[in-house]
């Protein structure tokens, strides 16, 4: 049963207080607010709901699911591509991320986030969607498609993490308190160095700085400690709730878009050297995953890393358009 909920429109430019994040870039479309009951508390998930471009034939609704180190606004170019193709585009920021509520006490799971997302779509009277998930959003998109296969017309996974079971492979579990201490130490420079090594395989482009600074601003803003705590809690979710063992159960049309220079592997820094050097091999992981998902299509981007939709949008768009 869908819980009692209500949908609100919020103009963030009129708000003062903790929801106004320091130096936060403007969202490309107004954020709206979805208020609902979850785990004995009232929570608000914020999202963009963008209409198809005027004059286009309606194609349905697309759902965009963000990664762990990103907010809804980094989908800006994808939103415009989908709008121009006739899609209504819904882009939520999950509970625990960015402008949405950051509860200090919450049992995070991909099942819970999928249920929250489904409740939002029910409120918006959206039945079936094209689902596109990037990075951690790929793990959530997979869980959503497993949980609600009848609600997914197609599943598109853009450099998803979770293509390997890090703990099973020998990465030590990171306790929440340890993760929280690490999150508290994050700065723009440390974020940039992590992204340079993991996302872009050592090749930095000034265009990437915008999104690294975007993340750093969350830690530096008035809700910085809540951001750090939520990031620690959701990191535990990544470690302990792998979807990799369920790919064979997917029943929806699935496409993998894999930048070949991606080396992302959460927890690698704490793993033994022999384990760490084997992790995050996306050329191999993409092919292994495509072989496990029934009738999956694999599109590989040579020369691109963790964010093909930002690194080379024209190539990304050329791959996406035939799927729309």
Image: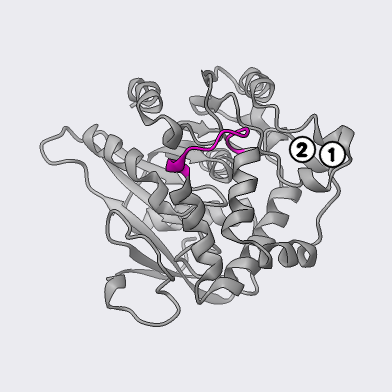
10 Å crowding of disc 2: few (<14), some (14-19), many (20+): many
- Answer yes or no: do the residues labelled 1 and 2 have beta carbons within 8 Å? yes
Residue ID at (15%, 34%):
56
Q: Main secondary structure of the magenta part?
A: loop
Applied colour scheme:
one colour
Residue ID at (61%, 20%):
290
Is residue 207 visible in the rendered structure shown here? Answer: yes
Q: Which residues are magenta?
A: 199-208
**Residue 201 among magenta residues:** yes
10 Å crowding of disc 1: few (<14), some (14-19), many (20+): few
Q: Can you identify the residue that label 1 sits on?
A: 168
* Left or right of 313, for residue 249: right
251 or 289, nearer to the observer: 289
Is residue 103 visible in the rendered structure shown here? Answer: no
Q: Can you identify the residue that label 2 sits on?
A: 165
210 or 255, nearer to the observer: 210
Q: Position of residue 127 (x, y in %)?
A: 36, 45
* Left or right of 86, for residue 4: right
Quarter of the C terminus within the rendering: top left
Q: Position of residue 197 (x, y in %)?
A: 65, 39
Give SS at disc 1: helix
Q: Quadrant of residue 12?
A: bottom left
């Amino acid at each position: 049963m869908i819980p009692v909920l209500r949908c609100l429109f919020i103009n963030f430019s009129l708000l003062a207080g903790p929801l106004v994040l320091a130096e936060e870039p403007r969202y490309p479309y107004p954020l709206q607010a979805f208020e609902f009951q979850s785990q004995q508390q009232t929570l608000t998930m914020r999202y963009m709901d963008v209409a198809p471009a005027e004059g286009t034939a309606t194609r349905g609704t697309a759902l965009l699911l963000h990664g762990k180190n990103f907010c809804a606004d980094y989908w800006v170019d994808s939103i415009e591509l989908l709008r121009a193709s006739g899609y209504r585009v819904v882009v939520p920021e999950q509970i625990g991320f960015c402008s949405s509520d950051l509860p200090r006490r919450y049992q995070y799971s991909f099942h819970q986030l999928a249920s929250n997302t489904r409740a939002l779509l029910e409120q918006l009277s959206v039945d079936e969607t094209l689902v596109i998930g990037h990075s951690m959003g790929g793990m959530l998109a997979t869980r959503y498609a497993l949980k609600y296969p009848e609600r997914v017309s197609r599943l598109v996974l853009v450099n998803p993490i979770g293509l390997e079971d890090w703990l099973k492979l020998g990465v030590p579990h990171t306790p929440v308190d340890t993760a929280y201490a690490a999150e508290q130490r994050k700065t723009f420079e440390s974020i940039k160095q992590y992204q340079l090594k993991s996302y872009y395989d050592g090749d930095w482009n000034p265009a990437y700085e915008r999104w690294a600074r975007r993340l750093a601003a969350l830690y530096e803003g008035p809700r910085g400690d809540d951001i750090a705590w939520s990031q620690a809690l959701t990191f535990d979710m990544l470690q302990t709730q792998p979807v990799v063992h369920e790919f064979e159960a997917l029943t929806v049309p699935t496409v993998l878009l894999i930048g070949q220079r991606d080396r992302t592997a959460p927890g690698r820094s704490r793993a033994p050297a022999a384990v760490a050097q084997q992790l995050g091999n996306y050329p191999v992981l993409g092919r292994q995953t495509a072989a496990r998902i029934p009738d999956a299509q694999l599109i590989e981007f040579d020369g691109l890393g963790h964010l093909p939709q930002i690194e080379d949008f024209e190539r990304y768009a050329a791959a996406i358009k035939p799927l729309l």
